[in-house]
Image (cartoon, grey):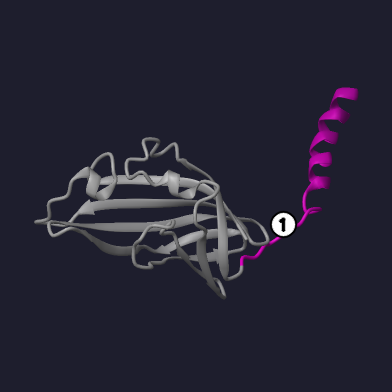
Amino acid sequence: MTKRILLLAAPLALLAGCGDSTDTVYTITTGSYDVSGGTATAAFPADACNMAPLFVTGQPPIDVTVSGTTAHFDLKGGQTLAQYFTTATINNNAINHTADANFLTTVGTLCTFRTHVRVNGEITANDQMHLIARYDITVEPGATCTLADVDADTLPCTSEVDFLASK
């Protein structure tokens, strides 16, 4: 009889705990965010585009512009490139990619390459985020680029960088 009571008590104790906690929804605001912890993800551990070093402590901040549930992320990481933005929607604490940054870079007279950038992640506290930025770089048809031109280990290349950002 004791075993039967214990078996019934366990599910009731679990149910009693349900619904007691509420998830806190955090916000991010427009501004510059310092980065730290930049590492290549397990999906792309080789960091073939050499992006992880751009997202470690002490590197230039990323700029974020927020309007309602839309956020634009400038993830150029201090590179001397024209400003570009990747767009995401904010749903509670989730940051979900909606549009890639998509731009061309020309080095010298022969090398032109295209970069696509996207970001996903989560808001972990007010004005604090855990993000994953994905970079895909390809050489444009007819162009001749060296690995040094692109600062990559291979071409085409893909890198995903996992990092923290806080205001």
**Relative image position of residue 24 (x, y in whole percent):** 72, 59
- Residue at the left extreme of this rendering: 142
Residue name at image x 39 percent, y 51 percent = 134
Q: Residues within 10 Å of mark 1 (few under 14, many from 20)?
A: few
Q: Is residue 163 left or right of residue 24?
A: left
Location of the C terminus by quadrant is bottom right
Residue hosting label 1: 23
Q: Is residue 17 magenta-colored?
A: yes
- Of the pair 104 and 90, the residue shown nearer to us: 104
- Above or below residue 161? Residue 167 is below
**Relative image position of residue 72 (x, y in whole percent):** 47, 68
Quarter residue 5 falls in: top right
Q: Secondary structure at mark 1?
A: loop
- Residue at the right extreme of this rendering: 2
**Relative image position of residue 157 (x, y in whole percent):** 28, 45
Residue 1 seen in render: no
Q: Which residues are magenta?
A: 1-28
Residue name at image x 25 percent, y 40 percent = 154
Q: Could you tell me how many numbered marks the image carries? A: 1
Q: Is residue 111 magenta-colored?
A: no
- Of the pair 50 and 4, the residue shown nearer to us: 50
**Relative image position of residue 2 (x, y in whole percent):** 90, 24
Hey, what amino acid is under mark 1? Asp
